Amino acid sequence: MRRLMEVVRSGRFDLTPLPTHSVSLRNLTEGYQIFGECLDGVLKVTVRP
């Protein structure tokens, strides 16, 4: 894990493509459902205000 964190910190690995879905805080339940049921090829759900 330490080695992975060093790679991420150094910028050699770009994490920006990982979020595949974004939901508003108001629709957080929908985000949990998408992630929990692995819908639509979800990798990571981000929550926006």
Image (spheres, rainbow, N blue to C red):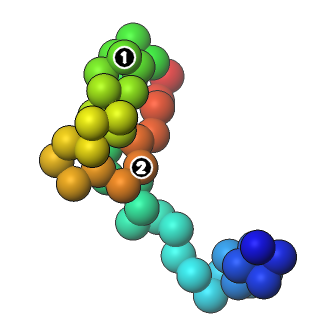
Whether 28 is drawn above or below 35: the answer is above
Residue at image position (37%, 17%) is 29
Q: Are marks 2 and 1 in contact (CB under 8 Å)?
A: no
| Amino acid identity at mark 1 | Thr
Whether 9 is drawn above or below 30: the answer is below
Residue nearest the viewer, comparing 25 with 32: 32
Q: Earlier in the sequence, mark 2 or mark 1?
A: 1
Whether 38 is drawn above or below 18: the answer is above
The answer to which quarter of the image holds residue 22 is top left
The answer to which quarter of the image holds residue 10 is bottom right
* Residue 9 seen: no
Residue at image position (36%, 55%) is 43
The answer to which quarter of the image holds residue 33 is top left
Q: Is residue 23 left or right of residue 4?
A: left
Mark 2 closeness class: few <14, some 14–19, many ≥20 residues within 10 Å: some
Q: Is residue 39 left or right of residue 26?
A: left
Residue nearest the viewer, comparing 14 with 34: 34
Return the residue at label 1.
29
| Amino acid identity at mark 2 | Lys
Q: Say what secondary structure mark 1 lies in.
A: helix
Q: Which mark is residue 8?
A: none
The spot of residue 24 in percent (x, y) is 38, 23
For marks 2 and 1, give the CA distance. Answer: 14 Å
Q: Residue furthest right?
A: 2
Q: Quadrant of the N terminus?
A: bottom right
The spot of residue 14 in percent (x, y) is 53, 76
* Residue 33 seen: yes
Mark 1 closeness class: few <14, some 14–19, many ≥20 residues within 10 Å: few
The spot of residue 20 in percent (x, y) is 31, 52
The spot of residue 3 in percent (x, y) is 78, 83
Return the residue at label 2.
44
